[in-house]
Image: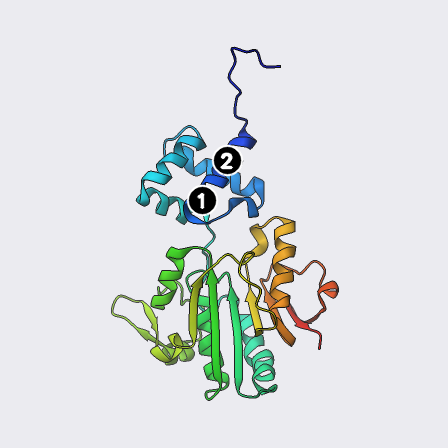
Amino acid sequence: MLSARTAPATTGADEFVLFAGGLRRICGIDLAQYRRGQMERRVRTWVQRRGHEGLAPYLELLRADKAELEAFLDRVTINVSQLWRNPDQWARLEHDVLPELIAAPPAGRLRAWSAGCSYGAEALTLAALARHVAPRAQVRITGTDIDRRIVERARTGVFTAEDARDAPAALLERFFASGDDGTWKARPEILASVAFEVGDLLRLPERREAYDLVLCRNTVIYFNDDVRDALHGRLVASLRPGGYLVVGSTERVTDAAGLDLVPAHPFTYRKGT
């Protein structure tokens, strides 16, 4: 028991919870959704490297210093992506999934969601591939991410040479314009197919049966199990019957059958009709 003269000590666990709550109020990013051990190590390592001893004073710095907040978010948020990332998945979409979806009634239309879109590589790859598969189709893709800075970058449609390292040369040159500095910029007709938005995937208003295809790849691997399962439920609810959910190559849907999903291809599920 604490004596009357002893102030309560903040435990490491309490300190992190308070820090996560404060960060959410500052920028909307909720660290509590992520696997605790991984995220806390990432945060504490960063704070120590920046020369700070505790999370509470560092949180005050984040409130006051926009540049420091930007640097911190770059470190702790997961924004790893590239054009045509995991080429085998894109080949499956090109040859099997997209032709089926675009041919299904009402034919000639594709509505898709890149959930956790990062800086737009996935959504714009999908836009290019859909245009390649069905040039006359009406394609509308929504890209959603919680990080406002990353969404602003996505809207530019500009990617580095490293981002484009696995892209098929012919499709890259057809749908992206090369810059003198080695960058690639999505052509206007591709950018026009995608609407990028800022949003928390777990708190957005439900979009029941709004999409033919949902891609949520390499997003949930850092989430705790409850958050992951809740998100998968929301993603499936947003699919029309017969639509497809594509997850990352290290991910799986825990209760696929309970969500009325059937494995169709590796890391690809089809919703029951």
Regarding mark 2 in the picture, which secondary structure is present there?
Answer: helix
Depth order, front residue of 266/254: 254
The reply to whether residue 33 is visible in this rendering is yes
Rendered location of residue 69, percent (x, y): 36, 44
Depth order, front residue of 177/257: 257
User: Image quadrant for the C terminus?
Assistant: bottom right
Circle 2: is it few (<14), some (14-19), or many (20+) Cα within 10 Å?
Answer: some
Q: Verify CB contact (< 8 Å) between mark 2 and mark 1.
A: no
User: Image quadrant for the N terminus?
Assistant: top right
Q: Which mark is residue 18?
A: 2
Q: Is residue 241 above or below residue 203?
A: below
Q: Which tag is nearer the camera, tag 2 or tag 1?
A: 1
Lateral position of residue 115 relative to residue 259, left or right? left
Which of the 4 image quadrants contains residue 148? bottom left
Of mark 2 and mark 1, the one earlier in the sequence is 2
Q: Is residue 6 above or below residue 157?
A: above
For badge 2, the amino acid type reads Leu
Q: Which mark is residue 74?
A: none
x 57%, y 68%: residue? 207
For badge 1, the amino acid type reads Arg
Which of the 4 image quadrants contains residue 91? bottom right
The reply to whether residue 49 is visible in this rendering is no
Q: Residue furthest left?
A: 180
Residue wearing tag 1? 25
Depth order, front residue of 230/43: 230
Mark 2–mark 1 distance (CA, rounded to whole Å): 11 Å
Q: Is residue 18 above or below residue 11?
A: below
Circle 1: is it few (<14), some (14-19), or many (20+) Cα within 10 Å?
Answer: few
Rendered location of residue 63, percent (x, y): 36, 40
x 52%, y 21%: residue? 9
x 41%, y 28%: residue? 53
